[in-house]
Amino acid sequence: MHRAVFFLTLALSSSIAMGQQSGASFWLTPGMTLRDAKGNITHMEIKDPKTFSMKVYDRGRWITYYYEPNSTTVTRVEGPDTSEDYLYENGKWNGLTVRARGHAHTIQATDDAVVADKMPRVTIAHDARGRDTEIRRGNEVVAAVNYDADGKVRRLTIGAMKLEFSVQSEGVREVLTANGKTLITTVAKSQGKRQFPVSFDPLADKLGLSGEWRNSVHFSQSATGSLISVSDELHRPLAEIVQLGGMGAAFDTNGAPLFYDVRLKYTAMPILADHGDAFADPNTVLRGIMPDGLIIPVSGDASAYVSRPGDGAISSLWTATKDGTPFYHFIVYHEAANQRAANLSFPSVTSLKTTGNVTARRRSWTVSPLMMWECGMEEHWACDSSGSSGYCYNYYTPVYCDSGGGGGYNPPPDDSGGGGSNAGGGNHVTGDPVLMMAVNNALSSAGGKFGDTRCSQDLFKNTKLSDGTSLADVLSQRGTSAASWLTDSLRYVNGYTNGACAGHPAWTLVNDTTVNVCTSFKNMGASQGAVVLIHEELHTLGLTEKPGYPDAAMDSAQITQLVMDYCGG
């Protein structure tokens, strides 16, 4: 959900490591080697001071980094499936050129703007607290965000469509309107099990996809994490997305630009360094309900989507124009699979010219009941309310998850990982390669610590929330493990240079999935950094701390000691 500071490109392989020294001293220090509990090498670095390069072995693959002489400034990366040039401006990393499959794509970004090959510039305006308020493509406003006095998102505007939120006892009430007419009202719950790395809803027809594309499209990530390849159910290429942290630029198989994928930032920047490293977020109650992704095509209407929708959430909304008439499309996600068309209620303000269900295109794949289960339904709507009267039609498509129930992925469950890929999680630190690799170093060390069940299981079983729920139960409810949650679900980004970062090496929002890593984190060794990240992981699972939460059981130092007691220093 967040795009902290220069929260833009490149998710390098989530376990690449690098020493924390800078300059010539880095090249005088041998590379690190990590082993699992059985003694097998899981990570290895081989430095060559003669060529100022370093080969990194991680998860069975080798990646080579090239540096400016006697420095820790990365200039080029070569992986098994991509080669990448780092781009700098005034000494700051602000871009990337990725070469793969005969194409070269360049994306450059700051916290305020992004531009990619043959695509118009997109700019993001913020308020005084760093929250997104307006997104423009060129001079055109494509999206706007309004907040209430408490800091919660009140309204998201996408073209002629407005999505409003109000918190009620039974859930979050969403009201979607277009040109002042109500299209649907729904009550939604918080985040669900299924995660979608990106939305192809507005371009499904152009790419030859059906309404069930989430159950057939495959996503595979490059070894460095900078490129996501998208293919259909027969593994035919559809598109590729160049990533720069909270930004992405998508291109078709011919290299033609398709759209930007922008992660929206709704959370205000913490300004009090003495309140610990865990902060409250007024928008926590809206997580899984308010859209966190924005699709901005080269031309035409923008659209919004929820990457991990909750039950009843309007998970996607977009406008399509046919013969000059705008049709307003939206999808309501149902976590339970027993929702059927018989339960349908049409928007009361529209007159229905068509009420029959629309049959989705036939799928060319099958689902094995041993691997997948129907974990939800999507209620697809299209409404024309541009005139004095309008009409809506709808149809339903199933949503499948893996048999474990966590995260979900697209059939067949092979190389892709589908919706369960870590396209949203992992290391998205940008602008500071040393900090970026310090995070990877710590993640690798944390993986080693989790090889001991005392760290990976007992810590989470014995740490409980105020209502008595253990963090192990929270992990189980989310269908994941401590190790997977740390590396695949949490997103690591640059922390702010003031506020919380003035007194902490990292900070997060309780129950959030973004960990902000500060400059001082570079001064930590791998093991110490791992302790910090596991500490932050506890907060993302709901653990509060004093003094920000006066009723919490522990303060920051006590939580760190708890982690060290179970996982080592």
Image (tube, rainbow, N blue to C red):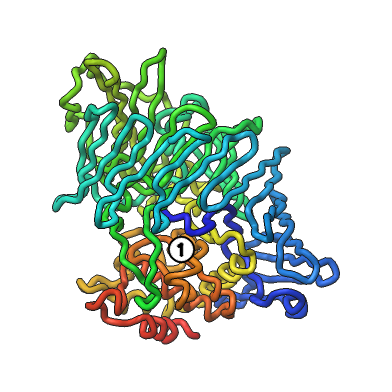
The single residue placed furthest to the right in the displayed view is 50
Q: How many marks?
A: 1
* Residue nearer the viewer, 521 or 396: 521
Residue 503: x %, y % from top left: 45, 78
Q: Amino acid at mark 1?
A: Ser
* Residue nearer the viewer, 382 or 268: 268
Is any part of residue 237 visible from this angle? no
Residue 317: x %, y % from top left: 35, 34
Does 462 sit above or below residue 252?
Answer: below
Q: Is residue 507 left or right of residue 109?
A: left
* Residue nearer the viewer, 271 or 326: 271
Residue 34: x %, y % from top left: 62, 75
Q: Quadrant of residue 100?
A: top right
Q: Residue at x 33, y 26 (%)?
A: 328
Q: Residue at x 26, y 56 (%)?
A: 285
Does 184 sit above or below residue 452?
Answer: above
**Residue that label 1 marks:** 484
Mark 1 Cα-neighbour bin, 10 Å: few <14, some 14–19, many ≥20: some
Q: Quadrant of residue 66?
A: bottom right
Residue 228: x %, y % from top left: 57, 45
Is any part of residue 193 visible from this angle? yes
Q: Secondary structure at mark 1?
A: helix
Does 532 sit above or below residue 437?
Answer: below
